[in-house]
Image (cartoon, helix red, strand yellow):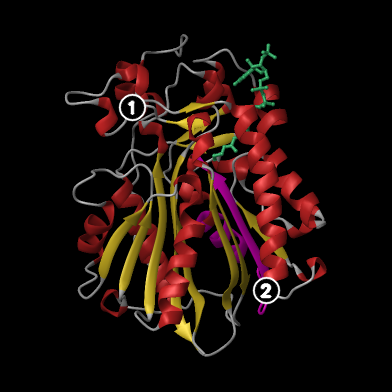
Amino acid sequence: MTYAEITGWGKALPPIVLSNSDLERIVDTNDDWITSRTGMKERRISHVEVSELSTVAAAQALAAAGLEPGDVDLLITATCTPETIIPPTSAVVQSKLGLNRAGAFDLNANCSGFVYGMVVASDMIKSGSVKRVLLVGAEKLSYIVDYTDRTTCVLFGDAAGAAVLEATDEPVGVLASELGVDGDAAPFLCVPQFGTLGGPGPRDPEHASLYMEGQEVFRRAVTKMGEASVNVVGAAGWSLDDVDLLIPHQANLRIIDATARRLGIESSKVFVNVHAYGNTSAATVPVALTEALESGRVTPGAHLVFAAFGGGLTWAAAAVRWGNRVEPLATSDMRVPDTDKTVWDVLEPNFEFFGRGGDRE
Ligand code: UT7
C-alpha cells in the first residue's frame, strides 16, 4: 500500500511586526485585553504579495525534502487572499519556482485550507495519480482587515508555510482525517461582498472587509476542533494517550486550550505560536509544523494531530504518523526581502481605503 510521508517543511514570515502596543495607537484596545482574550502579542504585516511569501516557504520545503523543482508533480496553494483570481496564485508560484512539470491549483477552505490540502494531497498520492506534492498555506489577511474595527484587526496577520508530501511504502503520513463545513453558519465569519456578489465596479469598503461574530465562531471552533480531533485519533486506531503533539490552527489560545482539554492532553503536547503571529488563516498550521520541527518538538515516528477551523464555517483534522527524519536535508537561500518601510507605511493604502483609526504619530 502507498502512503504519503511529509518530507519537507518551510515558512516565510514578513519582517514587519504589528504589536499590541501599535494596535493601541489605532483602535480602542489594550495589551491586557488582547493577551487575555486571545494569547496574541504580535503579528506580521507583509510588504510583498502572497505569491512571494508562498514561493519562499515552498523553496524552503523543497530544500528540506532534498528535491528539485522538476521533481514536483502537483502544487496546491491554500489561500483565501490570492493576489489575483485569474491567474490562481499557484500559477504564479509555479512560474517563480520553475516547477516545470507540475500541475497547480488554489484551494480555498479559509483557515482550514492547509489541513484540507494535506488530505487532498495525501489521498492523491495514495491513489497513485501523483508522487510528490508541494502544499502551501499562504495569506495576506492585512488586505481584507479593517484597522478601524477592533473586534477583528487585533487578530490577524500575514505569513506562509509549506510542506512536501511524497509517496512511500512506510505506514506514515495522514492515517485518518475528517473534513467538515456548516454553510448555514457562514455569515458569522465572512467578507460579505468580495467577489461577484459585490457587483461590477470597485470594491465597496463597507462590505469588503472581514466581518466576524467572535463568540459564535468561538463556540463552534471549540466544539468542532475538539470533536474532529478525537474522531481522527479513534479512526487512526490510536488511543488519546498515544498523541505526542497537537498542531492546531492558531486563532485563539483559549480555543487551542479547549481542543487540548477535549483530547485530554497536557499543554506540553500542544504546539502554540499564536503569541508571535496571530491568526494567519491557512498559513498557521504549516508555520506551526515548521516551528515544531525547528524546536525539536516532532520526534521520529511521532503521533501528530492537526486540527483547524475557519470561514465557511469549515473544519478539518488529521492524524499523522511522522516518518524518521526530523531534520531538513538542506535549506534554501530564498528569503522574504528586507524593507526600510514601517508598519504604518505598509498599512497606509489600507487606511486610505477602509479609513484610519487613532493618532499614530
Ligand atoms: O480563524 C477563524 C476562526 N476564528 C476564530 O476562531 C475566532 C473565534 N473568536 C474569538 O477568538 C473570540 O470570540 C474573540 C477573540 C474574537 C473575542 O473574544 P470574546 O471573549 O469572545 O469577546 P467578546 O466578543 O465577547 O467581547 C467582549 C468585550 C465586548 O465589550 P462589552 O460588550 O462586553 O462591553 C467587546 O466590545 O470586549 C470588547 N472588545 C474589545 N475590547 C478591547 C472586542 N474587541 C476588543 C478589543 N479590545 N480588541
Query: Residue type at mark 2?
Result: Ala
For the question of whether residue 317 can be seen, the reply is yes
User: In what quadrant of the picture does the C terminus appear?
Assistant: top left
Q: Which mark is residue 236?
A: 2
Q: Count neighbours of disc 1 (C-alpha within 10 A) and say few if under 14, some if 14 to 19, many if 20 or more.
A: some
Assign a secondary structure to mark 1: loop
Viewer-nearest residue: 17 or 306? 306
Assign a secondary structure to mark 2: loop
Viewer-nearest residue: 200 or 48? 200
Write down the region rendered in magenta: 286-311
Which residue is drawn at the image coordinates 49% and 15% (left, top)? 26
Left or right, 19 with respect to 201, comes to right
**Ligand 1 placement by image quarter:** top right
Q: Which residue is mark 1?
A: 193
For the question of whether residue 40 can be seen, the reply is no
Mark 2 close to ligand 1, CB under 8 Å: no
x and y percentages locating residue 18 in the rendered image = 49, 31
x and y percentages locating residue 29 in the rendered image = 60, 17
Q: Count neighbours of disc 2 (C-alpha within 10 A) and say few if under 14, some if 14 to 19, many if 20 or more.
A: some
Q: Earlier in the sequence, mark 2 or mark 1?
A: 1
Which residue is drawn at the image coordinates 69% and 43% (left, top)? 222
Left or right, 202 with respect to 222, comes to left
Say if 292 sits above or below 242 in the image: above
Which residue is drawn at the image coordinates 45% and 12% (left, top)? 357
Mark 1 close to ligand 1, CB under 8 Å: no
